[in-house]
Image: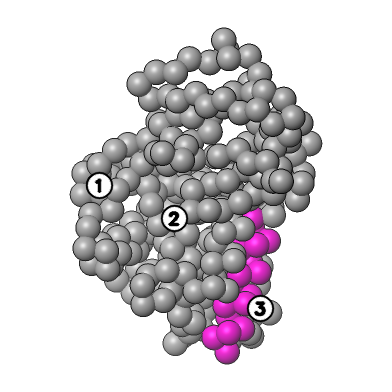
Amino acid sequence: MTAYVYYHYPDDPQYSLAYVTQDQDEITAGQNAIIERYELDEEFFVLYTNQGASGTVENLDDDFEDALDEMSPQNRTIAIRLLQIFEEIIEEKEIEEDAKLEIYKQIELERIPDAIDRINWDCAAVDVAGQLMSTLILKHALPNANHRTSISMAKWYLESIETGFSFPEFATEEYDWKRWVNEYIIESKRILTVRRNTTAFSLLAEWGCDVVKRKNDIEINLAEYNLDLSQSDAYEYYGDKHTDLCTEFLIESVTRAGHDELISTDGISKMEFVTYLEESE
């Protein structure tokens, strides 16, 4: 029988795993914390916390002028386009669901320049796009739709190289991911979760946990991941894994779209991409 530990608290997924211990005295439940006892091979306790924002997207502070002023002109152009993409996605999703989208954190615009500055622009087009998609997801600057927004930014980059390029349809009429896309998105979320929690997950495995279950029934089989890493090594190791996954996703996407030449076509520079974004406004 598979032994599960929940990553998001089942009765309220706004609460997520923050700490694991065998000594209950190390943790205290409070207004924004829940303690859950597990007994698998050994007894242990999981602290779930809710440190995010509450409300809907319309409650977000949209005064980003100060954060944008701190950025270089090129990073500012990319950040503004990212916000525009995000707003379009949220509007579409709210129309589809006929409800305002709930948020769990504020927009952290200051994370975007660091993401952009990590990209090696001197690569094949699909490799640069994979880095762009991955690093924006990893930095998690937005309260929702980080995957959709980052994929759209990768699309803008590939369009800047090949006029008329467009991705195959990624979503169904119900605004869910298509099956082949969903496989990449789910694995991306697994990698993101493991990347942040190798120490806790290593202890859970030692105490008898086989699978960590995220919300939306995403299961992380701990035996399939290297947990014997320090936190800094895990960030680098799984960051590279995530970039590889995003690049694989884009390779399949351009192939399905009939533009597999982008796999070997040289990418364009950051300055050229920014110029394309500015001219496309």
Is residue 232 at least partly visible in the picture? no
The three-letter amino acid code for the residue at tag 1 is Thr
What distance separates the C-alpha of mark 1 from that of mark 3?
A: 39 Å
The foreground one among 134 and 58 is: 58
Residue drawn 40% across the image and 57% down it: 145
Q: Does dot 1 land on a helix, a strand or a loop?
A: loop
Q: Do callouts 1 and 3 mark residues in contact (Cβ within 8 Å)?
A: no
Residue 157 image position (x, y, % from top left): 49, 71
Q: Residues within 10 Å of mark 3 (few under 14, many from 20)?
A: some
The three-letter amino acid code for the residue at tag 2 is Asn
Quadrant in the rendering for residue 129? bottom right
Q: Does dot 2 land on a helix, a strand or a loop?
A: helix
Q: Main structural element of the magenta stretch: helix, strand or loop?
A: helix
The foreground one among 81 and 195 is: 195
Dot 2 or dot 3, earlier in sequence? 2
Q: Single out the mark in the foreground, 2 or 3.
A: 2
The three-letter amino acid code for the residue at tag 3 is Ile
Which residues are the magenta region? 242-258
The label number, if any, that marks residue 146 in the structure image: 2
Residue drawn 27% across the image and 64% down it: 97
For disc 1, the marked residue is: 56
For disc 3, the marked residue is: 263
